[in-house]
Amino acid sequence: MSEDIRVRFAPSPTGPLHIGGVRTALYNFLFAKKMKGSMILRLEDTDQKRFVHGAEQYIKESLEWAGIHLDESPWNEGSFGPYRQSERKGIYKQYTDQLLADDKAYYAFDTAEELDEMRERLQNAKVANPQYNAITRMQMKNSLTLSKEEVAAKLANNEPYVIRVKIPAKEEVRLHDIVRDWVMVHSSTLDDKVLMKSDGMPTYHLANVVDDHLMKITHVIRGEEWLPSAPLHVLLYKYLGWQDTMPKFAHLPLLLKPDGNGKLSKRDGDRLGFPVFPIQGSFPDGKGNEESFSGFRETGYLPDALSNFIAFLGWNPGTEQELFDQSELIEAFSLERVNKAGTKFDIEKAKWYNQQYLKAKSSKELINMLDSQLKEDSIDLDKARLEIIAEMLRERITFSGDLKNIALTFLNRPDSYVEKVVKKKWTREAVNILDEYAKRLPLLDHQVFSATEAKVLLEQILEENGINIGRVMQALRLAVTGQGGGPDLMQIIEVLGKVETSERILVALSTLEGNIKE
Ligand code: GLU
C-alpha cells in the first residue's frame, strides 16, 4: 500500500460521550480496519475550563464496551505521542511563530470590554453577524494596527494577548469532502479565530490541525457540526505549508430526533425513554448539579447489536442485508456510502437489532447469561433447567435482562392471581381437573419428568372427563404462575418439577376457593 491510512477520533473530555460520538468513533474504526490502517484516539483537552473529571475514563470504557479497538491512544501510546493535547502544550508555539513570521497570524491585545464594545458597535450599525474579521480587525488593538514598537513594548510588558489567524479578505476556499463532494466558502464569511489563548494554550483549531499533521492523519472523519471549521483548517494547512499532505475530509450526517425534528440531543434520551449514551453515568450539568443518565449497556443492549444499529445511522451497504457482525461491517464499510442527509434515531430499530443478536446466541451463551443473572438473586438452577428456560425465552427477549425478568415470573411462587383471568377462567370444571391433576402429578413414577409427561397426564385426565384442553389451560397457567399469559406452560411445569407444580395448584385451589365460577 502506497499510503498508511491513519484516522483519529478526537473527543474533548468535557462530558460523557454521546451516541453520536460513538458513531463517529465506529466509522473511523471501520474505515481504518477496512483499509488495514491505524485507529488513533487523541484527547482534545486544551480547554481547561470545560474539563470534566471522569470524562476520559468514560470515553475509554464506552469504546472498550462497544468493541472499538484503538491502535494508539493515551492509554496505549504509539510513536506519535503524547495523545493528550494538554501534554503537547510545548509543541504548538513554533507553529504560531511561523504563522506570525509569515504574516498569516497576528497578536491581538483587545480586552474583553473592548471586544464587547466592538460587538455592540457593529450591532448598532445593523451588521448581521458581528465578528473579528478582515474588516473589523483594522479598528482593533492588534499587531496589524499598532506600530512595531508598540507591539514590542506590550510583549515586553507581558500584556495579555491572543494570536489570531489572519483570514484573507477575499478568497474562495474550496475543500473536498468525501461525503459532500466540493464545498466552497468565501473567506469574507470567516472570522479571525483565536489560535493561541492568553494562557498559552492552543485553541481547538490550531491544535487539531497541527496534531493531525504531526500524527500523519490521512482522513479526518467527524460530525457535520465541524464542517464550518473545515475551511479555516484548510487555510491553516496551506499557511503552514502542509497542503500536499492535508488529510481528506469526511463529515458525517447529523443524528436527528426520532420525529426528524432537529438534532438528537443529550436531553432527548431520558425524555423519550431510551438511552442516548453508551453506558450509564452521572456528570455535572454545568449548573452545579450532578445529572445522571441511562446507558445502552445497562438497558441490556449487546455491544454487537448496538454497533450494527449505529453503523446504519448514516451508512448503508447498498444491499438488503441488515445484520452485520463487526468483521462483516469492516468488510462492507465505505465512506462513499455515507449519506449526506441527517438520519433519524429510531430506537425501535435498535431493539430489533438487539432481539436478532440475542436470538442468534448459542445455547451455551444464553445459559451462562441467565445463570449469572439468576445467581444475582441467589437462584441456582441445574444446567438442564437453565437450558429449558433459555431456549424457551430465546425468541421472546429484547434485552438481556429479560431472561431473568421473565424467568422470575414463573420461578417464584405467585403471590397473586390476575383478577381478569380468575373471573373468566376459574370455572368449576377447570377446578375439578386441576384438583385431580395436582393429586396425580406427584405419583408419576417416570425416571425423567418432562413437558411431555406433564402434558400426557393432563390429556389423560381431560379425556377421562370428556373435557377439551382449551377449557382448562388458562386456569392451569393461573394456578402455576398467577399470570394470564407467558412462555410455554408445559415447559414451565417441567422446570418447576411435579411436586412444586402440584403444590402450587393446591395453593391456588384453596386461595381461590371462593372465586369459582359455577
Ligand atoms: N475535539 C473535537 C470534538 O470534540 C474534535 C473534532 C474533530 O474531529 O476535528 O469533537
Image (cartoon, rainbow, N blue to C red):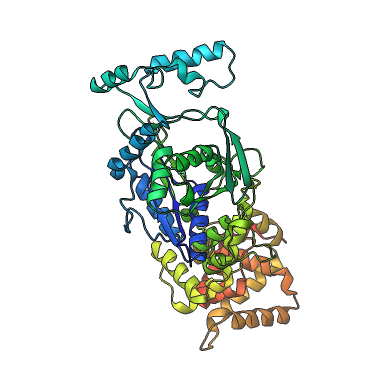
Q: In the figure, 183 relative to 132: above or below?
A: below
Residue 12 visible in rendering: no
Q: Quadrant of residue 64?
A: bottom left
Q: How many marks?
A: 0
The image position of residue 11, as x and y in percent, is 43, 46
Taking 464 as reference, is 507 above or below it? above
Q: Nearer the viewer, residue 389 or 369?
A: 369
Q: Quadrant of residue 394?
A: bottom right
Figure quadrant of the C terminus: bottom right
Q: Residue at x 54, y 75 (%)?
A: 388
Is 405 situated above or below 47? Answer: below
Q: Is residue 45 left or right of residue 254?
A: left
Q: Nearer the viewer, residue 319 or 205?
A: 205
The residue under the point 53% across, 58% down is 306
Task: Give the percent coordinates (x, y) of residue 75.
Answer: 32, 55
Residue 87 placement (x, y as % from top left): 28, 45
Image coords of residue 10 (percent x, y): 43, 48
Residue depicted at x 38% and y 20%: 142
Which residue occupies the foreground of this view, 196 or 518? 196
* Above/below status of 354 relative to 344: below
Residue 443 seen: yes
